[in-house]
Image (cartoon, grey):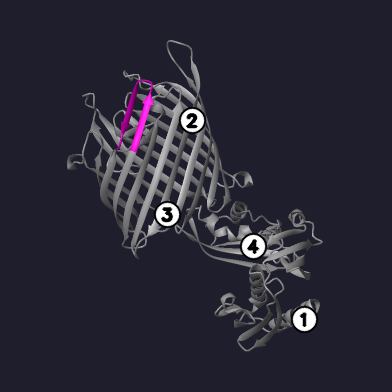
C-alpha cells in the first residue's frame, strides 16, 4: 500500500510540474490542505506557482516532525487561482527505529546507523544531514521514506536521501555600481565562483553585510539556472564617514608669551577603495602636557581569506607623569553574521617621566589576547531591542625596567566584559541597561598599567578618563524617548565600583552619575549633548561640578 501511494504521489507531482509549465509567468495561488489536523494546517497560504511543490514538501516534513512518519500527499488538484492538496496522515508514533540509505558519499550520513530515538531526536539528526547537504552544493536535498514496518508499537523506517541537483556559485551582481566591488563582496561573503552552493551562507548575507557600516542591504535575489546559482544584491549607501574637530589657543602654562594648541580631531573613513577598508584617526589635547593619539586600520577579507586584519597604534601622554605607546595587530573571524572572534598581539611600552610619587613605572609588555562579540539587535547603530555581549582576555609577559636593580619579569592578566540589553517598554520608549566589568592582576602594577574610566563612554558626569582602576564594575541605566527614527531624549543613571592596589598606593571609590540629554540625527550628521552630575566618596552631587558632554559628527 505504501509503495502504491508513493508511486501515486510521484505521478501527481509530475502532473503538477506539467501544469506549472503551462504558465510561464509566476502566479499567486491559494493552497488548501485536506486531511491534516487544524493545529498543523495553515489558516491560509498563498504562494507563487513555482513554489507549490516546495510548499507541499514542507507540509509533509512538518507532519513528520510531529510524529506522523507515514504521512504523504495523496493527490493534488489544480484549479483557477487555487491548489487543493490531499494528504494521508497515518498513525502517530512516539518512538522509531530507523536506518538511512544513500548512494551519496557524505561523511555525516554514516553516523545515522540503526538506533532507537524519539521523534525529536530523529528530526534533529535528519535536519542536520539536510543542512550538511544544503551547505555542500545540494540546496534541494530531501529525506524520503523508502519503506517501513510496524512491530510491537514501534515504527521501523528505512530512509533515503534524494540529493537533487548539484549547484555551484556562479555570478554575484552588486547594484548600484560603485558602492562595493563585486570581487570583494564575493570573497567577504564566501560566495566564490565555482564553489559549492551553501544555503547557510546565503541566508547569512544580511547579517554579514551589517558588519560593513558603509552599506545597507535593501533587497536580495537568488536564482538557479543550469546548475549555477546567481545572486543579486541591491545595496544602499550610508553616510558613515566623518571629520570633525575643535582647535583652541590658550596661554602657555609656564608664563611665557607663546600660546599652546589644544583641542580634538577625528577622522573616520569606512569604505576605502570600495572594499570596506576602514581608517580612523583620533587626536585630543585638552591640557598643555596631556595628549592622546589613536590610529586604527581594518582590512576585511585579508588576502582573500575569511579573516579581517586589524592594525592599531595608540599613544598617551599624561601630564608629566608617564607616556604609554601601544602597537596592536589582530585577526577577526566571523563564525556567523552575528558573532566575531579576535586573536591579537599587542606590544605596550610604558615610560615614567617625572612622577615623584613613584606610582608610574617603565616597562614593556607583550600581550596575547582572545576576544569575542555576539549580538542580536534589530539595528546595529541605533538599537531598540536585543542584546549584545563582548569579552576580552589578555595574557602579557612583562619586563620592568628598574634603575637600581636588575630588570624584573612577571606575568600580567587583563580581562574585561560588557553586556548591553535593549527593551521597548512603550511605542516610543526604550530601556537600555548595560553592565561592564574589568580585572587586572600582576605582581607589580603601576598607574600607567590601569584601566581608564569616566566620561561619555563609561561613567557619565565626570571628565574623560578621570579614574584609574585595576578592577571595576559599572552599570548604565538609560531611558530613551524617541522623537524620530534615530533622534531621542534620554535620562540616565550610572553606578560604578572600582579599586586598584599598585606599588605605591591604593584606591577605591563608588562613583555615580545622573543626568539628561538628547541625540538628534540630521541630514548633515549626528548631534549629541548630555548634562550630568557626578558623585564620589569625597564629593556629593553639585551643580558647580556638573559636566556637559557634547559631540557633533559631520557625516559624508
Percent position of residue 115, x then y: 74, 58
* Image quarter hosting the C terminus: bottom left
Q: Which mark is residue 120?
A: 4
Please identify, in this view, whether the residue under mark 1 or under mark 2 is nearer the observer. 1
State which tag comes first along the sequence, 2 or 4: 4
Q: Which residue is mark 3?
A: 381
Which residue is more in the foreground, 111 or 9? 111
Identify the secondary structure beneath mark 1. helix
On the picture, is 208 further left or further right than 514? Answer: right
* Image quarter hosting the N terminus: bottom right
Q: Which residue is mark 2?
A: 413
Measure the alpha-carbon separation of dots 4 and 3.
39 Å
Q: Residue furthest top?
A: 404
Task: Name the residue located 66 percent from the left edge and 82 percent from the top edge.
Answer: 85
Measure the alpha-carbon separation of dots 4 and 1.
29 Å
State which tag comes first along the sequence, 2 or 3: 3
Please identify, in this view, whether the residue under mark 2 or under mark 4 is nearer the observer. 4
Which residue is more in the foreground, 379 or 33? 33
- The answer to whether residue 16 is above or below residue 246 is below
Measure the alpha-carbon separation of dots 3 and 1.
54 Å
Task: Name the residue located 42 percent from the left edge and 58 percent from the top edge.
Answer: 385
- The residue segment tinted magenta is 497-510
Measure the alpha-carbon separation of dots 1 and 2.
68 Å
Q: Residues within 10 Å of mark 2 (few under 14, many from 20)?
A: some
Q: Are marks 2 and 4 in contact (CB under 8 Å)?
A: no
Please identify, in this view, whether the residue under mark 4 or under mark 3 is nearer the observer. 4
Q: Which mark is residue 8?
A: 1
State which tag comes first along the sequence, 1 or 2: 1
Measure the alpha-carbon separation of dots 2 and 3.
32 Å
Identify the secondary structure beneath mark 3. loop
Task: Name the residue located 64 percent from the left edge and 62 percent from the top edge.
Answer: 120
- The answer to whether residue 207 is above or below residue 437 is below
Amino acid at each position: 500500500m505504501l509503495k502504491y501511494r508513493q508511486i501515486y504521489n510521484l505521478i501527481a507531482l509530475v502532473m503538477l510540474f506539467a501544469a506549472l509549465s503551462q504558465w510561464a509567468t509566476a502566479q499567486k495561488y491559494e493552497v488548501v490542505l485536506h486531511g491534516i489536523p487544524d493545529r498543523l494546517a495553515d489558516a491560509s497560504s498563498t504562494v507563487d506557482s513555482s513554489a507549490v511543490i516546495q510548499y507541499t514538501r514542507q507540509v509533509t516534513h512538518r507532519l513528520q516532525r510531529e510524529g506522523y512518519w507515514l504521512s504523504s500527499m495523496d493527490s493534488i488538484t489544480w484549479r483557477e487561482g487555487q491548489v487543493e492538496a490531499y494528504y494521508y496522515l497515518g498513525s502517530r508514533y512516539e518512538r522509531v527505529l530507523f536506518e538511512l540509505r544513500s548512494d551519496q558519499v557524505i561523511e555525516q550520513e554514516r553516523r545515522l546507523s540503526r538506533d532507537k530515538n524519539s521523534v525529536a531526536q530523529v528530526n534533529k539528526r535528519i535536519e542536520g544531514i539536510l543542512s550538511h547537504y544544503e551547505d555542500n552544493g545540494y540546496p534541494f536535498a530531501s529525506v524520503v521514506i523508502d519503506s517501513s514496518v510496524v512491530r510491537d508499537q514501534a515504527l521501523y523506517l528505512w530512509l533515503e536521501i534524494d540529493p537533487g541537483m548539484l549547484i555551484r556559485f556562479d555570478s554575484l551582481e552588486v547594484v548600484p555600481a560603485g558602492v562595493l566591488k563585486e570581487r570583494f563582496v564575493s570573497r567577504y561573503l564566501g560566495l566564490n565562483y565555482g564553489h559549492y552552493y551553501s544555503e547557510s551562507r546565503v541566508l547569512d548575507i544580511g547579517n554579514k553585510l551589517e558588519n560593513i557600516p558603509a552599506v545597507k542591504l535593501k533587497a536580495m535575489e537568488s536564482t538557479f539556472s543550469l546548475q549555477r546559482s546567481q545572486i543579486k544584491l541591491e545595496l544602499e549607501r550610508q553616510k558613515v564617514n566623518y571629520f570633525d574637530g575643535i582647535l583652541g589657543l590658550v596661554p602657555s602654562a609656564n608664563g611665557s608669551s607663546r600660546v599652546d594648541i589644544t583641542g580634538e580631531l577625528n577622522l573616520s573613513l569606512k569604505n576605502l577603495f570600495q572594499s570596506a577598508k576602514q581608517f580612523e584617526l583620533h587626536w585630543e589635547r585638552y591640557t598643555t602636557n596631556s595628549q592622546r593619539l589613536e590610529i586604527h586600520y581594518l582590512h576585511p577579507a585579508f588576502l582573500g581569506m575569511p579573516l579581517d586584519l586589524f592594525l592599531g597604534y595608540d599613544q598617551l601622554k599624561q601630564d608629566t607623569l608617564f607616556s604609554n605607546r601601544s602597537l596592536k595587530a589582530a585577526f577577526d573571524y566571523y563564525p556567523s553574521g552575528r558573532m566575531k572572534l579576535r586573536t591579537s598581539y599587542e606590544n605596550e611600552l610604558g615610560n615614567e617621566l617625572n612622577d615623584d610619587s613613584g606610582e608610574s613605572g617603565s616597562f614593556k609588555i607583550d600581550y596575547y589576547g582572545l576576544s569575542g562579540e555576539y549580538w542580536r539587535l534589530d539595528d546595529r547603530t541605533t538599537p531598540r531591542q536585543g542584546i549584545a555581549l563582548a569579552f576580552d582576555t589578555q595574557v602579557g609577559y612583562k619586563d620592568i625596567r628598574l634603575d637600581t636593580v636588575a630588570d624584573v619579569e612577571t606575568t600580567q592578566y587583563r580581562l574585561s566584559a560588557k553586556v548591553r540589553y535593549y527593551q521597548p517598554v512603550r511605542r516610543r520608549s526604550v530601556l537600555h541597561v548595560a553592565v561592564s566589568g574589568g580585572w587586572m592582576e600582576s605582581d607589580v602594577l603601576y598607574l600607567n598599567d590601569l584601566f581608564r574610566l569616566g566620561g561619555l563612554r563609561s561613567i557619565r558626569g565626570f571628565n574623560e578618563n578621570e579614574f584609574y582602576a585595576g578592577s571595576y564594575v559599572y552599570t548604565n541605566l538609560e531611558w530613551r524617548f524617541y522623537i524620530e527614527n534615530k533622534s531621542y531624549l534620554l535620562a540616565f543613571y550610572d553606578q560604578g565600583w572600582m579599586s586598584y592596589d599598585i606599588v605605591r598606593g591604593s584606591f577605591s571609590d563608588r562613583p555615580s552619575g545622573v543626568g539628561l540629554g538628547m541625540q538628534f540625527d540630521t541630514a548633515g550628521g549626528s548631534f549629541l549633548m548630555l548634562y550630568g552630575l557626578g558623585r564620589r566618596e569625597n564629593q556629593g552631587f553639585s551643580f558647580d561640578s556638573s559636566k556637559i558632554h557634547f559631540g557633533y559628527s559631520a557625516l559624508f
